[in-house]
Image (tube, rainbow, N blue to C red):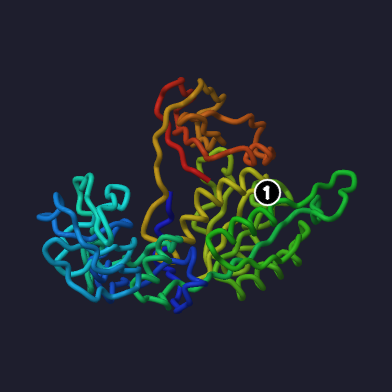
Amino acid sequence: MVLPFAAERELPVERVSLRSALGRILREDVFSDMDMPPFDKSAVDGFACRTADISRPLRVIETIAAGAVPRTDVGRGECSRIMTGAMVPAGADRVVMVEHTEPAGENTVMIKDAGAGTNICRRGEDIRKGDLALGKGARISPAHIAVLATTGNVTPMVSCLPGVGIISTGDELVEPETVPGTAQIRNSNASQLEAQVMTLPATPSYYGIIPDESSGLRHAINQSLGENDIILLSGGVSMGDFDLVPQIMKEAGVEILFRKIAVQPGKPTVFGHRDKVVIFGLPGNPVSSFVIFELLVRPFMLRMAGYKTTPARLMLPAGSNYTRRNDDRLALVPIALRDGAVYPVEYHGSAHINAFSAADGIMFMDIGKASVKQGESVHVRLI
């Protein structure tokens, strides 16, 4: 699930160094400034020679190290000792691995087994000068960093890091370093959301725990709306007497686009915007805030940054039977992967965040589906 609304709020761009590019979204096509390899190079340590001469003793005319330019062309009855990655000399059309040769006198070798291949990486076989190396919208991985370095693109254009405001609500909450009193609990949602945001990457700002009263909540929402691109607010979004978030959002000029979704857990999820700032009102239960971030917030933020790929839809076999009591919502079930099969982890409900510390992903069970049988293919998203 990806909210198309994100496409209307693409982030500005900036150029960064390669060291700062990991995880960022590329916002321009990248082309190679040279052939790769830039010359015919040896794939092995061995001897560069002519195929026509492999059945006769060969005189070694020079040694070619990686980074050196051959001094002499290879002629009839000749070969050059060559190292992996070195330039193949003119005249040679193959490289025989050193293990497949034996000495045949001073500066002379005999080929025992030429092998089937040439062991030569041809110029431009990986990519040609002017070819597209990376397409706009890629999320830069370590492999992409290598491609950027290889093609001389040392300051790629990427999306700016979005500012993400994080607000927790609830009179029952205390910060993690505080020992909770009677009827209190530690605030895990803020730390969890901050960590999830940082994996995108993005820049989180934490606005603290706001009590369930209008004035403090109104001030925090207004302040965060003026300082961020996205607001993540956990708690206070359900239908109880102290669930004030939707009303305060409206008072702050936020246009609410929806107030609940048919998922379990995470039904009381609010989404709205004020101008170009978007706000997610997430449920207060830790599992609900975690899975709604993965289901909606993460894909939204990636799309906002210009990422064009949707989350991978894996279809894997269920390793055991699984049944749920109610099937009126899309179920998001924490699972572990073992030997290529999906196993639901022990899970006690939307407050049981410990279940996700042992989870590899989320299994999706569609509305109307009450059970999964062992061996049945199920939809999984890795986390």
**10 Å crowding of disc 1: few (<14), some (14-19), many (20+):** many
Q: Among all residues in the image, which is located at the extreme front? A: 105
Q: Residue at x 66, y 53 (%)?
A: 192
Q: Residue at x 29, y 62 (%)?
A: 81
Q: Residue at x 42, y 70 (%)?
A: 10
Give left or right: position of 336 versus 211. Answer: left
Q: How many marks?
A: 1
Q: From the viewer's side, name the closer residue of 162 and 243.
A: 162
> Can the viewer see residue 275 in this picture?
no
Q: Among all residues in the image, which is located at the extreme right? A: 181
Describe the element under mark 1 as helix, strand or loop: loop
Q: Which residue is mark 1?
A: 284
Q: From the viewer's side, name the closer residue of 297 and 378.
A: 378
Task: Kindly identify the amino acid type of the residue bearing the numbered disc 1.
Answer: Gly
Q: Residue at x 42, y 36 (%)?
A: 379
Q: Is residue 373 above or below residue 159?
A: above
Residue 342, given in percent of the width and then of the height, sits at 49, 30
Q: From the viewer's side, name the closer residue of 292 and 256.
A: 292
Q: Is residue 289 above or below residue 65?
A: above
Q: From the viewer's side, name the closer residue of 257 and 358.
A: 358
> Can the viewer see residue 66 in this picture?
yes
Residue 67, given in percent of the width and then of the height, sits at 35, 73
Residue 288, given in percent of the width and then of the height, sits at 61, 44
Residue 148, given in percent of the width and then of the height, sits at 38, 70
Give left or right: position of 48 versus 247. Answer: left
Q: Is residue 28 above or below residue 346?
A: below
